Amino acid sequence: MIRFIGGILAAGALALSGCAATGTEMQASFDGSAPEGSPVALNGALSIADGRLVGEHGDPVTLRGMSLFWSQWGPQYYSRETVDWLVDDWKVTAIRASIAAEGQDSALNHFDREIAKASTVIEAAAANGIYVVLDWHAHRNHPEEAERFLTEIARRYGDLPNLIYEPFNEPLRDNVDWSRDVKPYHERMVAAIRAIDPDNVIILGTPSWSQDVDIAAQDPVEGENLGYTLHYYAGTHKEKLRAKGDAAIGAGLALMITEFGLVNADGDGPLDMESSQSWWDWAEANGISWMNWSISDRDESSAALKPGTPPAGWRAEDLTESGTILRSRLRATAGFAEE
Ligand code: MG
């Protein structure tokens, strides 16, 4: 999401605080085992083989779910009850925790608070047997803080089968070069994670807000179980970006859409369902996992929830147009009828 570079600064004074569930509250009921029949029970630990995400038996796996919003806003959704609801009612098989790593009110300055939010979501995902993307939600390089955060997560949860790392949400475009700037950052993060967790999948971001997968494909990061994220907003991004995705796939990269919207790249504006359908068709044809931006009650069209919606127990009238479409799509792809 592009717009919040400025938004962080502008909205800092409005940021919510002090109401996130904590990781320690969760730990009493968490033993790391996946419920019978759940996505993690069926597919186990994921890996990347021949440009595809696969489960422990070697079968291709396509995850579909929702991304939470920047963690400093709407922390009520960084909760066990929200994850439970998304699993039970929306039938998500993955969730993305977007741990804020820009601005004063973020993991850059509130390490323990944001570790607690990440832990809550990771443990809730594990308890439900779904996969979780731990997203270091940054637009700029903060290698010291990122390494500290990611290695703490690896120490706590690197043995779980359901954890996926995303060390750099959206590197910027201007004056940001993949080979010079972003690839060395990823090499450092991959080495730091791998020193603790030798195997869980790591999904890498690229310049131009994680659109330059074709450029990364010409000079990929060395290592096992590495994939690349491709972000799109259907109102803004169309065939030209899918062509970059096709080039990356053709070069052998495994892609995952860890973030997309039905709307414009600023997270707002009208829904573009014709473009969204083209993207979904493309993702399905290529077996690419996706997570929608976002579980949030902000007053903007990409938010799935209307302002004031509680952490769980959502009724039809609590959902925005985007949220209604995503819930239907997720339920349909999981084999559940409308209700
Ligand atoms: Mg591991």
Image: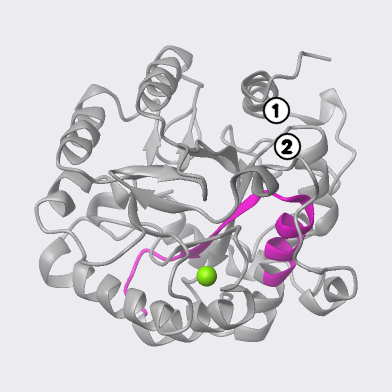
> Residue beneath label 1, please?
320
- Is residue 302 something one can see in this rendering? yes
For disc 1, the neighbor class at 10 Å (few under 14, some 14 to 19, many from 20) is many
Q: Quadrant of residue 293?
A: top right
For mark 1, give the secondary structure. loop
Query: Is residue 123 shown in magenta?
Result: yes
Tell me how many marks there are.
2
Q: Which residues are magenta?
A: 119-142
Residue at the farthest front position:
57
> Residue beneath label 2, please?
305
Q: Quadrant of residue 99?
A: bottom right
Q: Is residue 60 above or below residue 211?
A: above
Q: Which mark is residue 169?
A: none
Query: Is residue 82 shown in magenta?
Result: no
Q: Report whether 320 appears left or right of 229.
A: right
Are the residues at dot 2 and dot 1 in contact (C-beta closer than 8 Å)?
Answer: yes
Spatial distance from mark 2 to mark 1, Cα to Cα? 5 Å
**Residue 155 x, y percent position in the rendering:** 57, 83
Front-lying residue, 167 or 298: 167
For mark 2, give the secondary structure. loop
Q: Quadrant of the C terminus?
A: top right
**Residue 2 x, y percent position in the rendering:** 39, 50
Q: Earlier in the sequence, mark 2 or mark 1?
A: 2
Q: Quadrant of residue 124?
A: bottom right
Front-lying residue, 332 or 171: 332
| Three-letter code, disc 2 | Leu
| Three-letter code, disc 1 | Thr
Q: Residue at x 47, y 64 (%)?
A: 200
